[in-house]
């Protein structure tokens, strides 16, 4: 029974470990960038939705104001 490990196997494992450790920071930064992009896109989507809601309120206020102005005009004539 041999107590030594083939140097090719230890070299292959060492190279794999170095590769994984070398790629980990880049992968982590990539995940951070993806998360930031996703949260920014959700923020922009919420802003657009809020703006659309404000436009609806604006249209309702203008319609009500016009209705009241026309009602006053009709009473005076």
Image (tube, grey):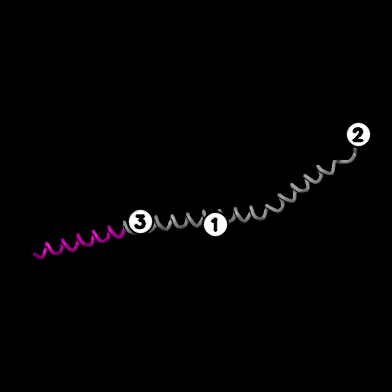
Q: Which residue lies furthest to the left in this view?
A: 77
Determine whether, in the image, residue 28 is placed left or right of residue 46. Answer: right
- Percent across and percent down for residue 65 are 23, 62
Circles 1 and 3, Cβ within 8 Å, touching? The answer is no
Question: Which residue in the protein does label 1 denote?
Answer: 36
- Percent across and percent down for residue 31 are 60, 53
Give the crowd class for mark 3: few <14, some 14-19, many >=20 residues within 10 Å.
few
Cα distance between the residues tagged 3 and 2: 77 Å
Q: In this view, does 7 lie above or below 66?
A: above
At x 72%, y 52%, the residue is 21
Give the crowd class for mark 1: few <14, some 14-19, many >=20 residues within 10 Å.
few
Numbered tag placed on residue 12 in the rendering: none
Q: Nearer the viewer, residue 69 or 20?
A: 20
Q: Is mark 2 on a helix, strand or loop?
A: loop
At x 77%, y 45%, the residue is 13
Numbered tag placed on residue 53 in the rendering: 3
Numbered tag placed on residue 1 in the rendering: 2
Q: What element carries label 1?
A: helix
- Percent across and percent down for residue 38 are 51, 53
Q: Quadrant of residue 26?
A: bottom right
Instruction: Tell me where the magenta segment starts and ends, as one range.
Output: 57-77
Ranked by sequence position, the earlier of labels 3 and 2 is 2
- Tag nearer the camera, 3 or 2: 2
> The N terminus is located in which quarter?
top right
């Amino acid at each position: 029974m041999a107590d030594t490990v083939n140097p090719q196997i230890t070299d292959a494992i060492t190279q794999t470990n170095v590769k994984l450790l070398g790629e980990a920071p880049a992968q982590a930064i990539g995940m951070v960038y993806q998360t930031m992009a996703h949260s920014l896109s959700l923020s922009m989507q919420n802003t657009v939705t809020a703006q659309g809601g404000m436009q609806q309120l604006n249209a309702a206020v203008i319609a009500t104001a016009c209705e009241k102005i026309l009602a006053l005009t009709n009473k005076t004539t």
